[in-house]
Image (cartoon, rainbow, N blue to C red):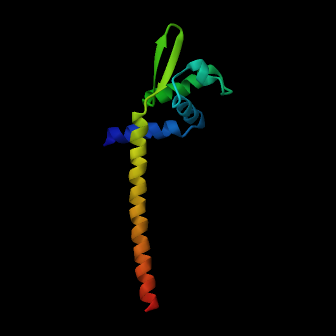
Amino acid sequence: MPQQSQNLDGIFHALADPTRRAVIQRLGRKPASVTELAEPFDMALPSFMQHLQLLEDCKLVRSKKSGRVRTYELTPAPLSAAEKWVSAQRAQWARRLDSLDDYLSRLAQKEHK
């Protein structure tokens, strides 16, 4: 569990930044070069590369180099792990809210008797 928790921490940390979320969204359409990915952002290339490195470190993206061009592509498996965790949390809270609703309904019925 600690390794899984560590992986999720990295994924959520990566997704916490709007630049990295935009990169993930862009790569969801198709792979892209560093130049293509960096183009819409008003930041120095070394700063942008730090974002890509963080995404690669948590395995949300992978890169390959062909000549002088480095291309990045999305690796969706870590996103699935994050989605699974969020879904489990949602289900747990839905159960808790359903229990609260049942309790409040029973309480209200007792008051009306």
Residue 7 placement (x, y as % from top left): 39, 37
In which quadrant of the rendered image does the N terminus lie?
top left
In the rendered image, which quarter is residue 35 located in? top right
Q: Is residue 108 above or below residue 85?
A: below
The C terminus: image quadrant: bottom left
Q: Residue at x 39, y 45 (%)?
A: 84
Q: Can I make out residue 109 in this image? A: yes
Which residue appears at 42% of the width and 71% of the height? 100
Q: Residue furthest front?
A: 29
**Number of numbered markers:** 0
Residue 94's spot in the image, x, y percent? 42, 61
Q: Is residue 6 above or below residue 71?
A: below
The answer to whether residue 47 is seen in the rendering is: no
> x, y percentage for residue 73?
48, 24
Residue 23 lies in quadrant? top right
Q: Residue furthest right?
A: 42
Query: Measured from the top left, where is residue 96 in percent x and y?
Result: 40, 65
- Which residue lies most toward the bottom here? 113
| Residue found at the far left of this picture | 1
